[in-house]
Image (tube, rainbow, N blue to C red):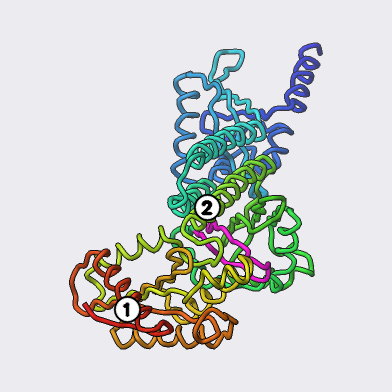
Amino acid sequence: MVDDSSARFHSLIIEHAPVWVNTLDTEGRVTLWNRAAERISGYRREEVVGHAAVWEWLYPDREYRATLLAEAEVVIREGREMAGRESTILTRSGEERTLSWHAQRFFDDDGALLGASAIAEDITERKQLEERAQRQHRLQAIVSAISAQFADISADAVDNAVTGVLQRLNEFFRMGRAYVIRFRPGGQTMDLVHEWCAPGIRPFLDEMQGIPLEAHAWVTGQIRRGRTVHVPDVDDLPEAAAFEQAEFRRQSIESLLLIPLISDQNAFGMLGFDSVNQRFHWNREEITTLQVVADIIAGTFARKQVEAELARQARVDGLTGLANRRQFDAVLERECRSRRAVNLALLMIDIDHFKPYNDRFGHQRGDDCLRRVAAVLQEAAHRPTDLVARYGGEEFACILPDTTLEGARAVAERVRREVEALQLDHPDNATGGVTVSLGVGVVTERRSLEPEALLGEADRLLYCAKREGRNRVCVAGL
């Protein structure tokens, strides 16, 4: 009676143990399956006791299952104990769980081998936490490297570096697409400016240019308010995002993450990640870390913009907005050394009797006169390759690549007429209004030329126009 009571007690302990307990006979068939085994696996004891089919259900991969059963065979036949062996099962509900196994064989009272007993601890959550911590550590290492890379990056290296960042992050998360979108000045449209796509994923860099913000009002509204947009399932988007939802579905986007790019407390774009053809959920630590990346990119863009503005200011005349003498010298040097252009024209322009004008009307009106003449020059030499510069004082210069002698004469005459048409009063000038004199030098054959030679010729022709009475054009070819 005592023995029966003790056996019953031991049976209850096994039945209600918080860990998986099962036993196998010498043929690998299940002989015991406790409640924890039922709960974890999803299979009732009535389904598994007496046969070995459950192992096919738990381990559907044939090779993986064969390896594990071979190890169980070693435990039963050779008496080797198993301790801490981890395996991943597929439960009845289709969920993967990770178990840590301890197994050994057992005998009856007469010493006959009965089979093997196994105890398994469900360590799924612990493994997930460990993997999550390791994953976060790797992500932080990537971000630290990005931060170091961007600390002193030059402006001309920023674009390639940003694309490289998108590639690293896209590959880390195994996403479909990573990208940067920027809002245009004025806040009406936006452009996709950087993109990295996984193999087989369609890029949109060429298509997504000048996209109206209003068309994506829900998303852009969130971003412009400085809010991160995390959408694990696009089907859960609110009704207000119906247009965006349709676009995401069209692009096979299942999940996305959009992080504002902020400078001076204003969002000017976004860092985005699209999970294509599969759903994905970024955890809170990952989102926080990616916000750091967005801040690095935003800060780099802002610094690049400041550097570009400083560089522009170094090349631009502050009064007229034209190129300054430094920029003029550099472009003239380049064009003269180039063997690409068959023709190269240089216009030297001088406002007639400007000093008396300035003395009579004052510097403020004199500055306005310079700006008005500069505007005429910019309108006349409007091609992307043309350069108009303030050469010094009341003198201007204009470089016209690929321009014939007659073409340069036509531009110069147009400038002369339109300045005269401004009808700016100038009592100290013969015409009674502001006029200009122009000297035009033109290279008419394919050859390298010293800048000083062309400049000297155009300057000589300018003084020729002045000597002949001003308000005229003198032209010659080299």
Front in this rendered view, residue 308 or 156: 308
Indicate the amino acid at tag 2: Leu
Question: Chief secondary structure of the magenta span?
Answer: strand
Locate residue 43, reporting x and y percent: 68, 43
Indicate the amino acid at tag 1: Cys
Question: How many other residues sit within 10 Å of disc 2, few (<14), some (14-19) or many (≥20)?
Answer: few
* In the rendered image, the vertical position of residue 178 relative to residue 361, given as above or below: above
Q: In the image, which residues are magenta? A: 175-195
Query: What is the total number of numbered labels drawn onto the structure image?
Result: 2
Locate residue 46, reporting x and y percent: 70, 42
Magenta stretch holds residue 78: no
Give the quadrant of residue 277.
Answer: bottom right
Residue occupying the point 54% across, 78% down: 428
Residue identifier under label 2: 310
Disc number at residue 464?
1
Residue occupying the point 54% across, 71% down: 356
SS state under label 2: helix
* 263 left or right, relative to 440: right
Give the quadrant of residue 25.
Answer: top right
Front in this rendered view, residue 278 or 476: 476
SS state under label 1: helix
Q: Please indicate, yes or no, whether residue 103 appears anywhere in the rendered image.
A: yes
